[in-house]
Image (spheres, rainbow, N blue to C red):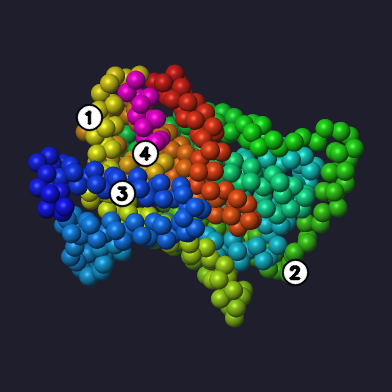
Amino acid sequence: MFALLCTSPVLLATGEGAVPTSVTLLFAGLLVAMILALALEEKLHAKKSLIVGVFAVICLLIATALELLPFGPVSVGGHEIEMPVYIPAVDWGVIAIILGSSLFIDVTSKSGLFTWIAIKLTKASRGEPRRLLWFYGLMTVVFSAVLNNVTAMLIVGSLTGVSLRKLGRERDLLGFLLIEGLLTNIGGLLTLISSVPNIIVGTAAGISFVEFFYKAAPYVAVATAVTIAMGIKLFKIEALTSDAERAEAAALVDGFDERDGVDSQGFFAFGAAMTVLFVLVIATTSVLPWVSELGMGYVALAFAAIMLIRYKSSVDQFYKGVDWDLLGFFAALFVVINVMEHALVLELIGHGLAWMIGLGETLGTGLVLISASAFSSVTDNIPLSAMLAKILANMGTPGSDPKWWSVVFGANLGGNLTPIGSASTLVAVTIIHRYKLELSFAGFVAKALPYALVQIVLAVAYVLLVLA
């Protein structure tokens, strides 16, 4: 079979040679099979990390047999070293962000800070569930705009669980967490540095930070409001209708003590200061000397290490709480996507999108946004964005052309179509499972699809009618 695949007469060119089209289609089939296996996760009785890990093993073996992978020394810090080909395939920055942020939040929560914030927000809502969802939804968008989406979801998810349990509204927890997960990808559209696709496309198109913000902000505001309003309706988050219910809820929240869980005022103050500093450093990582070179993963791990000093003799308790399944899933997924790049699956997708671009201004622009959304829901939106940006640049597309925005909106919003479409939606599902709530891959798609479709339709209309 390998000989047949290698001798296929139709080839796709790369900078290092050519790959038979039949080989590309084989790996595209493996990608589809992996997505189907993830959709059947509960029926297979297997964890996400194992499913994707098995596909990573299969993809690596076949790619090696077909001589697709670049074996040999890797240059690190100016020195050539030998390492397995799948090690540099992993985006260790993302792994570090998830690990460091999780540890930081877990340790900081012991100070009582998140309980304090949750109770303050709950009191401000006067126990009204819909108002609380608006507060948390807006906070999610703001955090996602200034932090990375994963960190934003981890922080807001922790606060949400505390607030709803305090109010005795655990039945609303699934709706809150799912809506917050979807809003992380909307918040990721707000600024040039809110997500990696924004940086890639914005830089290629020559879009400034200020221009990006004022062009993206109106859509983000509308999409946020629509998503929260839909969440209230579709998840049946009920308003308090009678004076008696409102009085009871107000009395309940008035009885909450935000100092509950604060065992040490000193540690609480330290945790609050470190959280503010963490947000500021994460938000300004790209412009800080030295730190910008080390990246956000370094920042997350550094802050986690500082907080762990408080429990220096028992740090193992926090290591046990790390979601290793989530980390394993991402590591394996990066390996699979890397193989797909070498097999030119992503390039095949790019050729399809390039064909759509040639269909005309209106039709082509709209189809690019919709297709980018679809493809980014099942594959890494970073190489996809880089490839599309290169295609647009090679076509001499001016920075004012709305097709650049089609790629930006599509790459970000596609993450709301499936739980593997973005890191933050997967983190949201992980938090949902942590609270013992049922939500399968197919269940996520079924619940998220109405929101994602509305968001994408709004994006198409916005790009064609406002940005064109």
SS state under label 3: helix
Q: Residues within 10 Å of mark 3 (few under 14, many from 20)?
A: some
Query: Who's the residue at 32% across and 42% down the image?
Result: 384
SS state under label 4: helix
Q: Is residue 183 above or below residue 403?
A: below
Whether residues under marks 3 and 1 lie with C-beta atoms below 8 angstroms apart, the answer is no
Look at discs 1 and 4 and give the one toward the viewer. Answer: 4
Instruction: Give the mark nearest the N terminus, 2 or 3.
Output: 3
Given residues 211 and 232, the one toward you in this image is 232
The residues colored magenta run 363-375
SS state under label 1: loop
Q: Main secondary structure of the magenta part?
A: helix
Residue beneath disc 4:
375
- Mark carried by residue 30: 3
Residue 423 locus on image (x, y percent): 46, 50
Instruction: Give the mark nearest the N terminus, 1 or 4.
Output: 4
Question: Residue flagged by tag 1: what amino acid is it?
Answer: Met
Question: Residue flagged by tag 3: what amino acid is it?
Answer: Leu
Whether residues under marks 2 and 4 lie with C-beta atoms below 8 angstroms apart, the answer is no
